[in-house]
Image: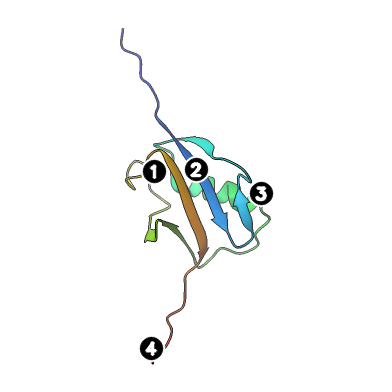
Amino acid sequence: METKVEAFVGVRVVTTSGAFPTEGFARVPIRQPVRQQLAEAVRELKIADTKDWVALVGGTEIDPDKSYAVNGLAGEVVIDYGPKEGGGGANA
């Protein structure tokens, strides 16, 4: 008899309003869309507006509508979630 084992990732969302969870990592299914954990972080940290926010892992933007697996994420993942940085002028 074959048993399906669900894989998990450890996830921590870091914003300018704080981190969720405040310590350690939340254990979430690897096939869950990233957006679910971002929404939970927004709710817990009482963030009002995330309209133009992006999710970054290691400086690379990920797609919140896709799962951790599809985004190529595993193990313990720290997601930097915040406003898209505006482009500046030419460096002098």
Circle number at residue 68: 1
Seen in the image, is 61 located left or right of residue 82?
left
Seen in the image, is 27 located left or right of residue 90?
right
Q: Residues within 10 Å of mark 3 (few under 14, many from 20)?
A: few
- SS for tag 1? loop
Residue that mark 4 sits on? 91
Q: Residue at x 56, y 63 (%)?
A: 50
Q: Residue at x 47, y 73 (%)?
A: 85
**Disc 1 to disc 4, C-alpha distance:** 36 Å
Q: Nearer the viewer, mark 2 or mark 3?
A: 2
Circle number at residue 44: 3
In the rendered structure, which disc, 3 or 1, sits on the residue that comes first in sequence? 3
Q: Nearer the viewer, mark 4 or mark 3?
A: 4
| Residue 74 location (% of width, % of height) | 37, 40
In the rendered structure, which disc, 1 or 4, sits on the residue that comes first in sequence? 1
Residue that mark 2 sits on? 11
Q: Nearer the viewer, mark 2 or mark 1?
A: 2
**Disc 3 to disc 1, C-alpha distance:** 21 Å
Q: Residues within 10 Å of mark 2 (few under 14, many from 20)?
A: many
Residue 91 sits in quarter: bottom left
- SS for tag 4? loop
**Disc 4 to disc 2, C-alpha distance:** 36 Å
